[in-house]
Structures are given as structure tokens and as C-alpha cells.
Amino acid sequence: MRRSDIRSSHPIPRLSRPLAGLTWRNAATETIAGVTLLAIAVPLNIGYAQIAGLPPTAGLYALVVPAIIYALVVSSRQLVASPDAAAAALVASSIGGLAVAGSADYVTMALAQAIISGVLFVLAAVFKLGFLANFLSKPILVGFVGGLALDILVSQLAKMLGVKIDSGGEFVEKVAGLIGGLPTLNGWSVLIAAVAVAVLVVGRRIARAVPWALIVLIAATVIVVATGLEQEGVAVLGPVEAGPPTLTWPILDWGTWLALIPSGIALTMVTMAEGLLVARSYGEKRGYSTSPNRDLLAFGAANITSGATGGFAVGSSTSRTAAMDQAGSRTQLPSLVAAVGTLLLLLFGTGLLEHIPSPAIGAIVGIAILPLLGVADFRQLWKQDRFEFVIGAVCFLATLFIGAIPGIVIAFVLALINLAKRASSPAIDVLAADDEPGSSLLDPAPTGTATAPGVIVIRLAAPLFFANGSVFSDAVKRAVSTTPDVQHVVLDLEAVTDIDVTGAEAFESLIHWLATERVQIAYSRPRQQIVDRMRALGLLTDEPVYRTNREALAALSTSSAVTGQPDTKE
């Protein structure tokens, strides 16, 4: 197979058997894991729906039909799809400026936003655009998600203290509201939240497999109902609409649909970046293959059905995926079990949800999002690369103080700056020869030293494009100027995979400069696609092309016998 064939595109793989990996032997384990997932997902999704400014049922509906569709389509056997903290915060920050949180228009926009995100996922799968997620590098993701997490944490602290703030406001407004409302905090709310946090933290250290969030929710609800703390000012969830999810479609004018596209893109990119990475890592860890395009298609189907059944944007849940892995789950059956359990809760148990105390929900969500702040990740970035730390910090602050959507735009700009910075400083070396005729030329030579008498071999370890064209040209000129008696320059093109028009202009200028200096140019080890590209750009006419650097030295060196002729048969 030619090297050019390796990158040939492939269509979206045909659907394999649903619930791959499920057998009679592991069915019981998978079912029990599903019950655990239900216990984890219900309290979190209620909390995330509140963060998003939506009714609790929006979080629960997203656990039913979308979860079933996703589980039957996705290639990953373990990645759990559900609304998460980042998605909830994005929904709140993007729609909050268009409608009042909790209003009918607001809910309708949230449904439309999920559908837009789903369509974008499907398009990304069809056109194989998953590579775009690579622009959200780790520092950018850490900063962006960390900013969202801190914004969410302020709202949850207000719930835990019994302080009323505008949860749809900007970060500074929330902090000001929280500080200004401290004199009105509710002592019973603080007590409930403190005990809940203690149980969650200590409980996880004692027995991680126990669904402590569900235990906290049940115990806090029983205590509030039994003691009448609701009359003492402890806020509760309130009435929850009973019944299964029903098919619907958001009716909005075209202007509103268009206004929701930027936030839909942001939701898609964040989920794409995190979801594909987590899916691949668990596939490698547990020894099964995954298909990124299939996974994008699954996220698309899940989001479209979520918007069409009363839910909101569905993303990847790293914490729930980890919990399922620890529970021994290796299939998507737990998602189906949780979907059935959630449906039964919606049909027969919504009355049990009405008196759940808000401080308990705040404690559960607050503990869940603490790892998303990225403190350990920022510490690691500081040690490894200060520039990447700055990128993460700028993205963190932009998300906090400017907003989630501007934050994702700034994230992309930072990604491009980071890419350009690295690409504009590629490794450009004059290669040194040694006394081993059979060895490759790999080591750089000291400045001002020729590879062989009259010949310097220069290697560019990057594509030649607008960001590094002039840098490469200057490096070659500097090498020729500082090395005495240079007659030939051989450009090792083995690592050059592409040349753009701007890079070609710099290259052409370099060729003219070498001609004025009476230095002949030759090429070695080019890929066939680069040879074709150089001919199309007018950079390669009758210049000699060699298969190896050794062959070039043997042909061009003025101090050795000519042992071969230039190979012009590319």
C-alpha cells in the first residue's frame, strides 16, 4: 500500500450488533450497574436541569428516549451520554439573554438548541469533521470547563446557604448576590448542606460503590417532610409534572433558530472533544474498538430525540462512565436499565420528588463538579509548560467574566495562536555526515559546518506553509552564508507533508536567492504527493531528486568520487 493510501477516507461503519459485549454471563452484573447508574443520574440530572433554568422533568426526560437511542447506536461500550454540568451551564448562559429562565419560551429554546446540536453532530459524522475537536486542546478544555464549573458552584453555594440569587445572571452578579444575601442565610439549609457534604465526602472514601447521592437525597427529603422544615424557610424542589416524555417540536421564528446556532456549535464542540477522547481511552483500556463517526452519529441522534421529547442538550458524562467501569460494566445495558427506571419514576414516583430540599441538591451537584474546576490540571500545566498554563488561565477567565459563548470563541483563537506559534518555529537542521556509509543522516551539524565538502543537507521537520515559510527561507540563507564554499544545498523533504501558496512564494524567493549566490539546489527523500505538489506550484522543474541523503552526497560532494547520477524518476 502506498503511503498516500493510508489516509484514504472511509464511510461511517455499518451498525454492529446493539449492546455489543452483552452475554448471559454478564447480564446480571450489567443490570446491577444499571440500577447504580439510575441512582447516580436522577439526583444529578434534576440538579443540572435547575442549573440550566429548566424544570426537573427536562433532566429526567433526557434519561429516557435519548439514552435508549444513544445506547443502540454508539460504538463505545461504556461511554455514558447524559446532560452534564458544562452543557447545563452553556444552556443557561446562552439562552438566558434571549428569554426568562423557566418561561415557556426559554424551555422551547432549550429544546431547539438540543436539536441544533444534534443536527451538527450528524453533519460532523457524515462529513468526518471529528478532527475539529482536536482544536480544543487540554489547556483550553481545562480552562473552559473550569470557568463553567466555578460559575455553577456559586449557584450551588447559594442553594446550600438558603440565599436567593439570580441563577441566570453573570458570574460577577451571582457573586455579588451571594455576598449581599449572606445576612439572610437559612441556618437549617446550611445544616442540611453541611451534613450532605460530609456524608458524600466521607462515604465515597469508605465505599465508593454505594450511591451516596441517592441516600443523601432520600434522607434529606424524609427529614424535611417529617420535621416541617419547609415552613422554616428551607427551599424544596416543588411539584414535578408526572407522565412519560411525549413527542414535541419547538415552534420558533427563523431569527431565534439562527440566534441559537452559536451556542449549538459550542455544545457540539465541547461534547465532541471530551466524548471522543473518553470513548477512545476506555476502548483502549478494555480492548475493544470504537468508531468516532459512529459515536458522533449517536450523540446527534440522542440530542435530536432529547429536543423532540422535552429534554435538553446531551453530552458525555466522564464521571458516570468511570462509575460504570468501576462497577464492572462493559456494555450499554446500564443506560437502558436507567432509562426504564427513570420512566417508571416519571409514571409513578414524581410525588416523591416534590419535597427534595434544594440545599441537598446543591451539595450533590457541588461535590460532583468540584473535579471540573481543574485545580490539579492547572498545577500540572504550570509545571510542564507555562505558555499552555497561560492559555488555560485566559480561557478560564474569559469564560467566567465574558461568557460561555465568547469563551469558546476565545478558546478557538487561542488554539490557532498556539498552533501558529509552534508551527512557526519548526526544527530546521543542517545534517551531519558520519563515517558509517550505511547509516542515515539524522544528527544536526554544528553551526557553520557543511554536511560534506561543498554540500549542506538541510531538513525541515514540518509542512511548509504561511506560518513558517519565511522562517525556513531565512534558516537556509543563514546556513549558506555561515558555511564556507557551499556549492550545493540538498533539501531533505521526508518530513514535509504539504506546501501552501504562501510557503511556495517563500520557497520560490529562496530558489532565486540561491541562484544569485551560485548555489545549486537539489532534493532528497520527497513523498510522491509533495513532488506532484511542487510541480504544480512551479517549484520543481529539472532539479535533481535523490532517493536518500547518502545518494545526494555521493553525487554532489566535491571531495569524493561520483558514484551515482541524480535520480529524476520521482
Image (cartoon, helix red, strand yellow):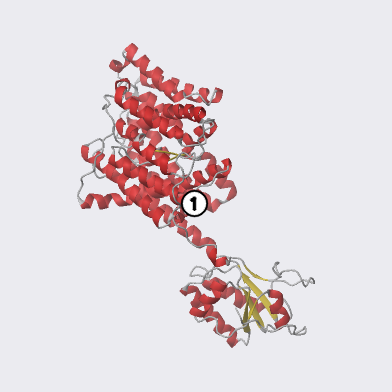
Label 1 residue SS: loop
Closer to us: 255 or 337: 337
Residue at the image position 50 percent from the left and 49 percent from the top: 139
Closer to us: 267 or 305: 305
Q: Which residue is mark 1?
A: 137
Measuring from the top left, give residue 88's x and y in whole percent.
36, 39
Please say if 345 is above or below 519. above
Measuring from the top left, give residue 23's x and y in whole percent.
51, 34
Closer to us: 57 or 483: 57
Question: Image quadrant of residue 162?
Answer: top left
Left or right of 4 in this view: 84: left
Measuring from the top left, give residue 3's x and y in whole percent.
57, 66
Residue at the image position 47 percent from the left and 47 percent from the top: 276
How many numbered markers are drawn? 1
Extreme-top residue of the structure: 227
Left or right of 423 in this view: 216: left
Q: Quadrant of the C terminus?
A: bottom right
Residue 12 visible at all = yes
Question: Image quadrant of residue 107?
Answer: top left
Left or right of 198 in this view: 428: right
Mark 1, other Cα within 10 Å: few <14 / some 14–19 / many ≥20:
some
Residue 315 visible at all = no
Please say if 123 is above or below 275. below
Measuring from the top left, give residue 199's x and y in whole percent.
48, 21
Residue at the image position 42 percent from the left and 49 percent from the top: 296
Q: Quadrant of the N terminus?
A: bottom right
Please state which amino acid type lies under the numbered disc 1. Ser
